[in-house]
Amino acid sequence: MSLDDEVILRDLNDDDLVEQMKDDLYDGLADEVKEGTQILLERGWDANQVLSDALVEGMRIVGVDFRDGILFVPEVLQCAHAMKGGMALLRPILASSENTSKIGKYVIGTVKGDIHDIGKNLVGMMLEGAGFEVIDIGINNPVENYLEAIDKHEPNVLGMSALLTTTMPYMGVVIEEFDKRGILKELPVMVGGAPLNQEFADAINATSYGRDAARSAELAKALVGVNR
Amino acid sequence: MAVTQRAVPSWPKRLWGLIADMVVARGHKQDGPRLLVLACGALAKEIVALRKQLGERAANMELQCLPADFHNRPHKIAPAIDLILTERRVDFDHVLVGYGECGTGGELDKVLAKHHAERLPFAHCYEFFAGSPLFNQITEEEIGSFYLTDYLVRHFDRLVMGGLGLDRHPELRDLYFANYRRVVYLAQTRDIGLEAQAATAADKLGLAFDYRYVGYGELKSAIAAAAAEIDHEERYYVRN
């Protein structure tokens, strides 16, 4: 096949199509990922399987290459945009499907003083792909917002995000408040964001540190006792 | 002042090659206490201007800069500073590191403690240019403020548009800047050309524009204090 040959997605068998979708997702080709998703659904694939085998697995590869410095933020955002195209088709099916039960609720938000949400949104997408019901409380959240979300949604896991070294210490403030109220005994708290590391997460007594979106989803699944 | 030539460290050669030649200005005295200002390349022009203002009092000040691109790659700052100070700390009596915390997540402070060096006690250059009270006030007024300095205005297309990939993917602009409301230009110099460039930059990002002349702020005080300390030691050194 020459480089100029156009790949006709409908002509591919299922395995090749899934591989092609992962490539297209990696290349940020939103229309192609959406078309591939549609084809798999028409062929009778379960929406959960399309999500996990093609989209989530594709984003996992993107995450690895981002971590290894092969891809950078702009490329990752293109990939995320492509994944969203497929998710848009799957979400209504997953929401209405009787045999689909969520593996847990996950409240996620960026901490007070910080308005950055790109990483948080990527994590939210991967969590959704992993089967969580994600409650995103947005940016610039004081401890009161987290407490309110816990009362209202009774999540299985709570995640905090920060991009700035000036705002990441606030995660410690939130965790301390959870500890004072006895919440920390019952609720695992994950932290993540570009300037964080495991040492910081340990220092503020976080349950776990998600170094990237794919890893965060894996850790969250482990926290609710799901490994699939 | 002559700088002793040392063997290039074996690791990491690429990084060393990038930063070893970035001595912007050397001290010219042959004796007396010596000061190394090791700074972000984004501050080079400003520190050279401050050094000039100080005249002879800065005669034993050497300025070495790291690539300003580290602004977008803060994890590279601490290892680079460590590498330079491992090689060069012994040649100087004092070292002032012209960085704030700058997103290093505490790594820079660990390196500085190891080498008995100090940095500017602020989060980043925006804070030490504006001064903490004004910076906090601006942030409280509007948390969605995106800051520019003279350097960032001059290199906006490369560092911001290129650095964020907006030159290749302009459609990502609203994803990056959805939560920002305005560009705040913290100007070091009164330059209507730069002010116009900054306004254009704000327009490119689809944000409102706010201009604040702040001068060199706490950077000026820190450089002057370090030079004064060396000057004081030199007088003592000469007398004894």
Image (cartoon, coloured by chain):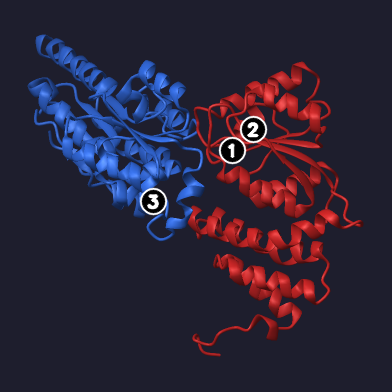
Residue at point 49% right, 30% down? Answer: B106
Q: Quadrant of the C terminus of chain B?
A: top left
Label 1: chain letter? A
Q: Which residue is mark 2?
A: A201
Please tell me the colour of chain A. Answer: red
Question: Disc 3 vs disc 2: which is toward the camera?
Answer: 3
Which one is in front, A129 or A95? A95
The answer to whether the residues at label 2 and label 1 have Cβ atoms under 8 Å apart is yes
Disc 2 crowd rating (10 Å Cα; few below 14, some 14-19, many 20+) is many
Tag 3 subunit:
B
Could you tell me residue B24's position as x and y percent?
18, 40
Amino acid of disc 2: Ala
Q: Amino acid at mark 1?
A: Asn
Chain of residue at mark 2 = A
**Residue B41 appears in view:** no
Q: Residue at x 45, y 35 (%)?
A: B103
Residue behind mark 1: A197
Quarter occupied by residue A57: bottom right
Residue sticking out furthest to the right? A99
Q: Which residue is mark 3?
A: B163
Residue at horizontal 42%, vertical 41%? B79
Along the viewing direction, whichever of A65 and A73 lies nearer the viewer? A73
